[in-house]
Image (spheres, coloured by chain):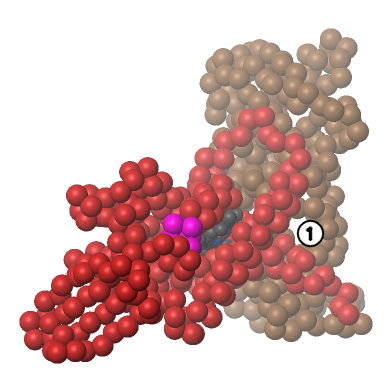
Amino acid sequence: MSRFNQLFSSTIGKKLIMSLTGIFLSLFLVVHLVGNLQLFKSDGGLAFNEYAYFMTHFAPIKAISYLLYATFIVHALYSLIITYRNRKARPIAYASYNGAANSTWNSRNMGLLGTIILIFLVTHMSNFWYQYHWGDVPYVEYTTNIQTGETSVRDIPAAEFHDFVKYIEDGSEIMIAKDLYKEVNFSFQSWYLVVFYVLAMVALGFHLAHGFKSAFQTLGFDHNRYAPLIRAIGFWIFGILIPLLFAAMPLYSFFVVNS
Amino acid sequence: MNLTLKVWRQKNENTRGKFHTYEAKDISEDMSFLEMLDVVNDEITRKGEDPIYFDHDCREGICGMCSLYINGRPHGPKEQITTCQLHMRSFHDGQTIVIEPWRAAAFPVLKDLAVDRSAFDRIQQAGGYISVNTGGTPDANIIPIPKVKADEAFNSATCIGCGACVAACKNSSAMLFVGAKVAQFAVLPQGQAERKERAQAMVDQMDKEGFGSCTNTGACEAECPVGISLSNIATLNREYLGAKIIKEVEVH
Ligand code: HEM
Ligand code: SF4
Ligand code: FES
């Protein structure tokens, strides 16, 4: 036994958990983004559907995805625990408060932004993740002529579908898969879902524009050359570029694919 | 100039306070903020009422005793000064000024605008020192310290313990204060012997006092009258996590 408090009962220890889970979630976003960029391909969803199958059936990735769900829960849970303590630390609020004079709006509203992201996540998971695993998804068959590279797409009825397959027959590559691509574009026919997705990405941008650099400060990372680099990456890549590309997906679907 | 003051009045720790409105008349813009309050208090006293109670001592920005949350900011609208260094020319004629005490569970209001900051003293007593044997005066430069290290330690040591960082922080976090007190010794050879214990003991005490945790908003740095930087918080995180994860020195 130590005469000191345990690490994770301290305020700094709890922030360590926020920081590590936050960085892991940020890395996940990069992977998720790169995969989803295939939605922008005009191949009838071939690459995207193959990627969706790979991500849900390759064992190491499946293991990481369970770790990811746990990370989300731990991150949200600790944000609740930390926010509760922080509220208790100021029982009487100021009558006149000028927070804008000394700090950014998003840094003061991480809990609010996180809550918006959480609501988004629930919607997002039930739209696609749940549908893909247990819901009614359309099925599709792609036939690609190996010599010309031309692909023809054919919707197939549920009765014809047994499992994901990919094989070569008579000079053509054939792939039969669940058509998540169609499901995605179907969902984004509704303009209010598109608006909701875009707003959620704005919240994500604000959350990460502060959160990414904050996570490194929590770890004590303060290198005089690389800390400014981290701040720039946090703002430009995680605060702006990544949310922008994610937000472009429902917009592309609504204005380009569906019209 | 004439001003309207909305001042927090509270009899003692156990009673509930509320705002009172006072008119401050014929205030010179060369007065300091505290001198302005002296003038108002003069009049209140002459009326036979209880004057506004506020903390102050040196009135030249070195003791850290004066506090006051003025129009939504600790030490008022200017950067890098204490309230005693704030002059009335920073306000305009006819302005309404809201004056509140520091708000934190760890800083209970003693009376009116004065809060009990002894939580800071207890954090200091937990580890903000080095143990040395007394005896003859040692030679001044007997321990060689590089200039940059000496400067770094000195920058941290300029913290006057005013508590503006806690007052400014949305979480009432004391990380900037504790960071400065830990960093000041962490870079010096004299601080090495108790380094691991210091970080743990001071953070434990900080948590026990009921300060919040750090969201890295930077409000503390922006409001600190002596410019203690966020680097001190990074150092505190490093010192504490290093002591906990890499090597927790236990003497007993
Ligand atoms: C489940 C929904 C989420 C909630 C409720 C949430 C909440 C929070 C809160 C309240 C903080 C600030 C903690 C503090 O005050 O010290 C925070 C920090 C952070 N969050 Fe989230 N968040 C969520 C989702 C995310 C996601 C999806 C990401 C990244 C992809 C993320 C990345 C971060 C990072 C990097 C930090 C900084 C950690 C630090 O300051 O040390 N969060 N989050
Ligand atoms: S760090 Fe700055 S604001 Fe905080 S107590 Fe020290 S001098 Fe005051
Ligand atoms: S009274 Fe000493 S710093 Fe203001």
Helix, strand or loop status at disc 1: helix
Q: What range is drawn magenta here? A: A124-131
Query: What residue is at 78 percent from the left and 23 percent from the top?
Result: B18
Q: Position of residue A22 (x, y in %)?
A: 54, 66
Q: Chain B is drawn in which colour?
A: brown
Query: What residue is at 35 percent from the left and 68 percent from the top?
Result: A158
Whether residue A126 appears in magenta in the rendering, the answer is yes
In the image, is residue B107 above or below residue B205? above
Query: What residue is at 48 percent from the left and 53 percent from the top?
Result: A123
Q: Which of A116 and B20 is in front in this view?
A: A116
Q: Which of A140 and B10 is in front in this view?
A: A140
Left or right placement of residue A171 versus residue B231 in this view: left
| Quarter of the view holding residue B190 | bottom right
| Quarter of the view holding residue B186 | bottom right
Residue carrying label 1: B207
Q: Colour of chain A?
A: red
Indicate which quadrant contains ligand 3. Answer: top right
Q: Where is residue B61 in the image (x, y as percent from the top left)?
A: 68, 44
Q: Residues within 10 Å of mark 1 (few under 14, many from 20)?
A: many
> Which quarter shows the N terminus of chain B?
top right
Query: What residue is at 57 percent from the left and 75 percent from the top?
Result: A67
> Which quarter shows the C terminus of chain B?
bottom right
Whether residue A155 appears in magenta in the rendering, the answer is no
| Quarter of the view holding residue B188 | bottom right
Residue kind at label 1, given as amino acid type? Asp
Q: Where is residue A8 in the image (x, y as percent from the top left)?
A: 74, 69
